[in-house]
Image (cartoon, grey):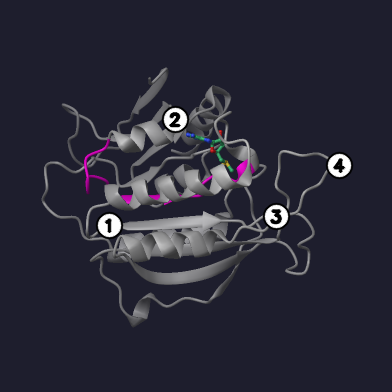
Amino acid sequence: MYFHKYTKYTEKCAYLLYGGEKQQYELLCADSMVWLKNQKNKSLKNVVTGIPDFAEVKSSKIPDIKSYVKWFNQIAELIMLSIQPNGYCIFIQTDRKLSGKQNPPNYKFEWISKSNLLMNCAKKNKFRLIWHKIASYRPIADTYIRPGYSHMLCFTKNGLHDVESKFPDVIDSPTKLYPNGTPYEALQITMDFIKKYYKSTNNDDLFPYDIVDPFIGQGTVGVVALSKGFSIFGIDIDPEQVKKTENNLANAI
Ligand SMILES: C[S@@+](CC[C@H](N)C(=O)[O-])C[C@H]1O[C@@H](n2cnc3c(N)ncnc32)[C@H](O)[C@@H]1O
């Protein structure tokens, strides 16, 4: 099922993994639905990702909004089931009005509240919402087809947090490293949060990477994770994206 695998070993290793060197990052070209289904429950440390929009899901099995919502819910649940109790899952989601697969003049306007879907999933799986922020990268009124902001939601089962974890509700985040990329400044705050609060348990079953992004795209989450000293495991179904990310991550370390 996994048709490409890119692995990078570096000398910047603080401790030992895989027989001698710490792997700072690994990229896999695969369908994340399949990968997540194959993970043990509670084996991932932290997930930071944006579940793709309707137009970005590369599967003929998702022809309409109804099947997209079902797929979105399934992915969100698989992520939550895969996270260890002390870990965090942070979603950065943009709600689009355009259903995506139609072009003008056949626009079909739909508005899916992905935050609402995530909240329902969290409730079902007994996860707590730690914070919900807005990352703003364009003037807020500019929302004709694609809003100029993204929602950021952080969930955990038993992870720590305290009043000091507070940061502004709206984060000015003008930088995108890549087209359609995740807002950069907001990700920096996200990684600082994980750095401060994440406490791993001594559990040999844990997947070794600090951060997993199952929809890595061109790798903004990976670039920021590496810059903050985390190791990152990224997955993307599109081999072209994986190749670009490989370059972007190599340049980031
Ligand atoms: C919006 S991009 C992510 C952008 C990324 N956060 C960045 O900053 O570069 C969404 C990605 O999800 C990938 N994708 C879509 N369906 C997927 C699936 N089933 N499994 C893995 N990746 C998938 C797409 O190829 C696309 O690169």
**Some atom of ligand 1 lies within 8 Å of the CB belonging to the residue at label 4:** no
Q: Nearer the viewer, mark 1 or mark 2?
A: 2
Sooner in the amino-acid sequence: mark 1 or mark 2:
2
Say if mark 4 contacts mark 3, CB within 8 Å.
Answer: no
Mark carried by residue 71: none
Residue 124 shows in the view: yes
In this rendering, the answer to whether 30 lies above or below 112 is above
| Cα distance between the residues tagged 4 and 3 | 15 Å
Q: Is residue 42 inside the magenta stretch?
A: yes
Badge 1: residue crowd in 10 Å (few <14, some 14–19, many ≥20): many
Horizontal arrangement in the rendering, residue 146 relative to residue 103 (left or right): left
Residue type, label 1: Gly
Disc 3 marks a residue whose amino acid type is: Glu
Q: Which residue is mark 4?
A: 104
| Residue 2, image x, y percentages | 38, 21
* Residue ID for mark 2: 31
Q: Mark 2 or 4, which is nearer the eye?
A: 4
User: Outermost residue toward the right?
Assistant: 105
Residue under label 1, please give it.
Answer: 87
Majority secondary structure of the magenta segment? Answer: loop
